[in-house]
Image (spheres, helix red, strand yellow):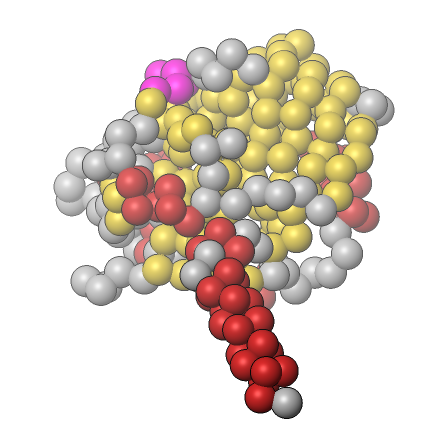
Amino acid sequence: MMRIIRYLLVVTFLVVAIYGCSPVQENEDVLFQVSTMNAIFRADYDGEITYGKLKQHGDFGIGTFDALDGELFALEGKFYRIKADGKAYPVDDSMKTPFAVITFFQPDKSVLLDEASDYKQLRKYLDSLLPAKDIFYAIKIEGTFEHVKARNIPGQNRPYPQFSEVVKNQIIFEFDDVQGTMVGFWCPAYLEEINVPGYHFHFITKDKRMGGHLLDCQTENVKIEIDYTPEFHMALSESG
Ligand SMILES: [Zn+2]
């Protein structure tokens, strides 16, 4: 009997050792968010945490940079900063972000969409693929687009203007017959003020040279992958 108990203790210890000490195991289905959209709407554009730290929480995501100077596009652990000129630049670990949403991307569902769809039709189709409307979904859409309309905004100077003013100076980029990838999230309506309810995507061209925050698109032939993300971790600013 003692031997069985000792054996069980060893097994229990091993289980704890394997699962308790593996950060990857814990973090895979967690959406990690830095600050809130509410802070952005309050014109708080100061970077809160470094990209070096952010990268520990995911390999896939979107966000912005200190002083809103660039749009984040992260895919397969590669991070890009798309600036006001529409071009993608490397992200240094010392750079900071005032708002970012990130996860480890492991798709639970994968479908092909070979019917041309405008952004409204695409969102309606995506709606039909999401099993529950109370969790987050990380979404990757890759393939050929007839058209993509994206925007970028220039870095801001203090005193920071309101976000509604910032957006007035957005620079629009349009791509025709382009191959590329959209990465982003679907966020439940009840998280308004915290995140962006509904869909929020950033786009990058296949050569990873240009992109931006997605405003509109027309798909031609794309693969849609969806990662169900039921856990949520939010890192808030201590300075308020
Ligand atoms: Zn965006």
- Of the pair 84 and 82, the residue shown nearer to us: 82
Q: Residue furthest right?
A: 115
Quadrant where the N terminus lies?
Answer: bottom right
x, y percent for residue 127: 75, 48
x, y percent for residue 131: 77, 56
Residue 230 quadrant: bottom right
Residue 160 quadrant: top left
The residue depicted at 37 percent of the width and 42 percent of the height is 55
Q: Residue furthest left?
A: 158
The residue depicted at 80 percent of the width and 28 percent of the height is 113
6 lies left or right of 239: right
- Of the pair 163 and 232, the residue shown nearer to us: 232
* 117 lies above or below 42: above
Quadrant where the C terminus lies?
Answer: bottom left
- The answer to whether residue 86 is magenta is yes
74 lies left or right of 146: left
Secondary structure of the magenta portion, mostly?
loop
133 lies left or right of 80: right
The residue depicted at 42 percent of the width and 49 percent of the height is 57
* 31 lies above or below 223: below
The residue depicted at 57 percent of the width and 71 percent of the height is 11
- Give the residues in magenta: 84-89
Q: Is residue 149 visible?
A: yes
- Of the pair 177 and 10, the residue shown nearer to us: 10
Report the label total.
Answer: 0
Q: Is residue 12 visible?
A: no
28 lies left or right of 220: left
x, y percent for residue 217: 65, 26
x, y percent for residue 73: 45, 31
